[in-house]
């Protein structure tokens, strides 16, 4: 792979060195790296500051300072990308634009209105539910002894919370989960989706839109004690969220508020199960639970990469990007950058434990304008679930290698077989 001024051309498949068989940044789309993408990320990060996917005119950044810089730079935002190399569902299906893909002033207005409904008080009300359901699920899992912890624990709780948040009845949780999986997979580039997956994405989009169009209409007539009713009611100087905007926000909450939380908790449990000493240390000092969640967001983040588009001609990494050119920010690689994090490949419970000596900022919930509004809810769920696990389980024993979901941008464990040794 040729390298010029910090930009590595990866239109072909030349060797980059470092990891045998790595053919360039295009390999972030290759499912063979799904279970462990970090050796690939290291090779890409060390071989060039910015990689280029041609002919798509799509850059790839893997270094922490560069990724943070783009997220802070108003020259980068969201417009539909024509590139087939990175064209997520939110650019193709009109019902799925959401705040994730909006720029100011539209984004500013949407975020302001949503913030008036999605308040700390609303989020805090879910703690008793999370605590009770965590206990119920884990008591049943401990009684069984050996379980798939994703199926038994890390998936059911976030699903129940997000459905309750949006006013979705328990009887519809299963179909809701199926839509979430199809829509999350649909965030990956079209080039890695087969025709069946693209069809599933389209069908999930249609079914979700139909369901929530009806639910929104019902909540307008009969408000309930849920976030959807609050979003319908919220106003500022006569400004309200329209029907399409409400639908887009529901999609955002489904993808960002459910799947990512499932993956966050599963990744935390997996990291701790692989390091019994750290699990024991955490059990002995529960004040480290919040730091353990932050370290998971750095060490093995659910959202591995995200995209931005140049809104005007701009310079980046010594290169000129034209308006409309795209960039992929690989947070999973940036989080292992030794220039930002000492011993980056080590899962360290104490990394985020000291307010007086804070670690570098991770990008697990984004950064800047698009920082995740649901981060407090995800943290509440994850901390509650991990605490409940520590209360009931003295030791975790992995009994089979974990399998991973087919998703790339939002990465997570499909099955985690463990034996639970009760306290």
Image (tube, grey):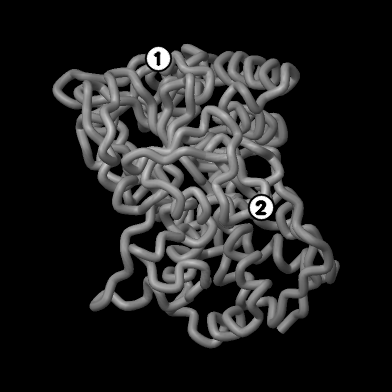
Depth order, front residue of 142/126? 142
Residue 278 location (% of width, % of height): 57, 80
For mark 1, give the secondary structure.
helix
Does the rendering let one see residue 295? yes
Q: To which residue does mark 1 refer?
A: 243
Residue 189 location (% of width, % of height): 56, 26
Within 10 Å of disc 1 (Cα), the crowding (few <14, some 14-19, many 20+) is few
Q: Quadrant of the C terminus?
A: bottom right
Mark positioned earlier in the residue sequence (1 or 2): 2
Does the rendering let one see residue 156? no
Q: Between marks 1 and 2, how big is the CA–CA gap?
A: 51 Å
For mark 2, give the secondary structure.
loop
- Residue 64 drawn above or below residue 422: above
Residue farthest left in this picture: 237
Q: To which residue does mark 2 refer?
A: 20
Identify the image quadrant of residue 51. top left
User: From the viewer's perspective, is 404 left or right of 184?
Assistant: right
Depth order, front residue of 322/227? 322
Identify the image quadrant of residue 198. top right
Residue beneath the point at 69% across and 38% down: 406
Depth order, front residue of 109/166? 109
């Amino acid at each position: 792979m040729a390298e010029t001024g910090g930009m590595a051309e990866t239109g072909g498949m030349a060797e980059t060195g470092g990891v045998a068989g790595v053919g360039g940044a295009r390999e972030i789309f290759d499912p063979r790296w799904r279970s462990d993408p970090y050796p690939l990320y290291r090779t890409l990060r060390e071989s060039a500051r910015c990689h280029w996917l041609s002919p798509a005119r799509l850059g790839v950044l893997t270094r922490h300072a560069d990724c943070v810089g783009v997220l802070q730079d108003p020259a980068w935002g969201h417009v539909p990308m024509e590139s087939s190399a990175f064209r997520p569902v939110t650019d193709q299906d009109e019902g799925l634009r959401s705040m994730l893909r909006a720029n100011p002033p539209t984004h500013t207005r949407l975020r302001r209105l949503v913030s008036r409904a999605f308040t700390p008080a609303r989020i805090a009300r879910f703690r008793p539910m999370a605590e009770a359901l965590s206990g119920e699920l884990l008591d049943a899992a401990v009684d069984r002894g050996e379980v798939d912890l994703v199926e038994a624990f890390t998936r059911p709780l976030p699903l129940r919370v997000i459905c309750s948040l949006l006013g979705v009845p328990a009887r519809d949780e299963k179909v809701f989960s199926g839509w979430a999986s199809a829509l999350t997979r649909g965030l990956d580039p079209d080039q890695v989706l087969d025709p069946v997956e693209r069809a599933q994405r389209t069908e999930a989009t249609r079914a979700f839109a139909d369901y929530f169009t009806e639910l929104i209409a019902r909540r307008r007539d009969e408000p309930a004690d849920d976030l959807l009713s609050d979003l319908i009611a919220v106003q500022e100087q006569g400004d309200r969220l329209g029907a399409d905007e409400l639908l887009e926000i529901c999609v955002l909450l489904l993808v960002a508020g459910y799947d990512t939380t499932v993956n966050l908790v599963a990744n935390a449990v997996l990291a701790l199960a692989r390091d019994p000493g750290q699990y024991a240390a955490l059990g002995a000092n529960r004040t480290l639970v919040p730091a353990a969640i932050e370290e998971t967001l750095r060490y093995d983040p659910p959202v591995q990469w995200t995209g931005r588009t140049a809104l005007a001609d701009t310079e980046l990494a010594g290169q000129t990007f034209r308006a409309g050119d795209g960039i992929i920010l690989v947070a999973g690689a940036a989080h292992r950058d030794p220039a930002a994090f000492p011993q980056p490949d080590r899962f360290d419970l104490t990394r985020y434990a000291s307010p007086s000596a804070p670690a570098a900022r991770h990008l697990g919930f984004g950064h800047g304008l698009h920082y995740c509004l649901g981060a407090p809810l995800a943290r509440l769920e994850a901390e509650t679930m991990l605490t409940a696990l520590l209360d009931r389980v003295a030791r975790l024993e992995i009994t089979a290698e974990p399998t991973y979901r087919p998703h790339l941008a939002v990465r997570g464990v499909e099955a985690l077989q463990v034996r639970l040794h009760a306290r």
